[in-house]
Image: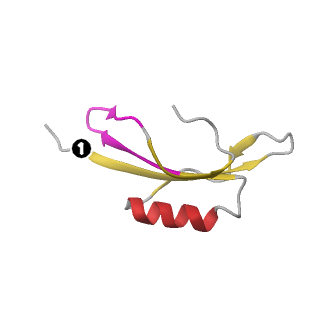
Amino acid sequence: MSPKAKLIVLVAFRKNDDGDLVPAFDPRQIDTEERAKREARLMADQYAGVVAWSREADPAIGEYGPPVILYQHGDCPDFE
């Protein structure tokens, strides 16, 4: 059995011309939770919304745990 890794992701959102939230860039994988929170805080004033989250992952078998929000600011879509 392979060890589980932690997937840590940062994504920001902007509003398009219709006022809908859209990703400002492709989700970025970050090395550590602390770095993800720090980068998200730095981006908070530049975007309509920003969120950093993590989840336990075992990509070898396609198994992913529930997302855990590390930092969220502004308008972001609901997380499932």
Tell me if residue 49 is in the magenta stretch: no
| Residue at 64% over, 38% down | 77
Range of residues picked out in magenta: 52-66
What percent of the width, then of the height, locates residue 53? Answer: 47, 48
Q: Is residue 60 left or right of residue 20?
A: left
**Quadrant occupied by the N terminus:** top left
- What amino acid type is highlighted by mark number 1? Lys
Q: Is residue 26 left or right of residue 15?
A: left
Q: Magenta region, mostly helix, strand or loop?
A: strand
| Residue at 80% over, 45% down | 16
Q: Is residue 16 left or right of residue 57?
A: right
| Residue at 58% over, 64% down | 41
Number of other residues with Cα within 10 Å of mark 1, as a class: few under 14, some 14 to 19, many 20 or more = some
Q: In the depicted view, which residue is nearer to us: 34 or 59? A: 34
What percent of the width, then of the height, locates residue 20? Answer: 78, 39
Position above or below: 39 against 60 = below
Quarter occupied by residue 66:
top left
SS assignment at label 1: loop
Q: Is residue 48 left or right of residue 6?
A: right
Colour scheme shown = secondary structure
Tell me if residue 53 is in the magenta stretch: yes
Total numbered circles = 1
What percent of the width, then of the height, locates residue 49? Answer: 67, 51
Q: In the depicted view, which residue is nearer to us: 74 or 12? A: 74
What percent of the width, then of the height, locates residue 12? Answer: 63, 53
Quarter occupied by residue 64:
top left
Position above or below: 37 against 6 = below
| Residue at 70% over, 64% down | 45
Q: As drawn, which residue projects farthest toward the left?
A: 1
Disc 1 designates what residue?
A: 4
